[in-house]
Image (spheres, rainbow, N blue to C red):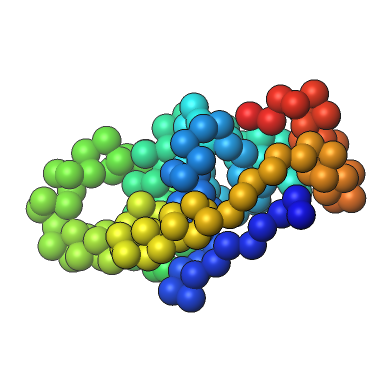
């Protein structure tokens, strides 16, 4: 089959996708509108939003992650590190985050808590290793036609054109 299902009883899909990007260790495209994946954008990992039908750009994924941790995530019911801490205030804190964390105990505690929930690299090693092993046990037979059919079915024209030219990156 063109698709394999990998899961773990103690992990979310985000975690499995994160491990998959590490397992692949080559150019990978994540197809999702979930903003949590912005932290993974790199030379090797691209993020395609199938709703907006665009590749998401993130100039500094590390800074994005710090802002996300500071602001929290209403969708995932993760509170901000402080009351009335929004995007503008977080933007001003990012460059000196270490200094802010050093002088503010409450901020430091909440930041550490949010980081465990938001930062995909915080996945406990035993769970990471289990998922990684699951990837090892799957045989990937890249079939561009199967993926192309998937793209047609879900009207992913831009991605479909790239696959058709075998340029998925």
From the viewer's perspective, is 144 left or right of 58? right
Residue 166 percent location from the top left of the image: 75, 26
Q: Position of residue 164 (x, y in %)?
A: 83, 29
The residue at the point 51 percent across, 40 percent down is: 24
Marker count (numbered): 0
82 and 141: which is toward the camera: 141
Image coordinates for residue 45, horizontal then vertical, percent: 53, 36
122 over 51 or under it: above or below: below
Q: Residue at x 30, y 41 (%)?
A: 94
Residue 38 place in picture, x, y as percent: 51, 43
Q: Is residue 107 visible?
A: yes
User: Looking at the rendering, in which quadrant would you find the C terminus?
Assistant: top right
Q: Is residue 35 above or below residue 48?
A: below
Relative to 31, residue 125 above or below: below
The residue lying at 46 percent from left, 45 percent from top is 23
Closer to us: 110 or 104: 110
Q: In the rendered view of the protein, which quadrant contains the N terminus?
A: bottom right
Q: Residue at x 35, y 52 (%)?
A: 121
User: Residue 75: in sight, yes or no?
Assistant: no
Q: Is residue 103 left or right of residue 60?
A: left
Q: Which quadrant of the view contains residue 55?
A: top right
Against 38, residue 113 (above or below) is: below
């Amino acid at each position: 089959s063109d698709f394999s299902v990998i899961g773990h009883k103690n992990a979310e899909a985000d975690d499995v996708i994160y491990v998959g990007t590490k397992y692949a260790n080559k150019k990978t495209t994540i197809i999702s509108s979930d903003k949590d994946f912005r932290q993974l954008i790199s030379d090797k990992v691209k993020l395609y939003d199938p709703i907006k039908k665009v590749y998401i750009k993130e100039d500094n994924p590390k800074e994005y992650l710090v802002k996300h941790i500071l602001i929290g995530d209403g969708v995932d019911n993760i509170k901000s590190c402080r009351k009335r801490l929004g995007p503008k205030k977080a933007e001003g804190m990012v460059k000196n985050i270490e200094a802010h964390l050093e002088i503010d105990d409450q901020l430091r505690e909440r930041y550490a808590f949010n980081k465990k929930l938001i930062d995909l690299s915080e996945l406990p090693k035993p769970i990471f290793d289990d998922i990684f092993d699951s990837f090892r046990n799957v045989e990937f037979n890249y079939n561009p036609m199967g993926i192309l059919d998937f793209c047609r079915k879900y009207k992913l024209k831009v991605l479909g054109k790239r696959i058709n030219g075998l340029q998925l990156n």
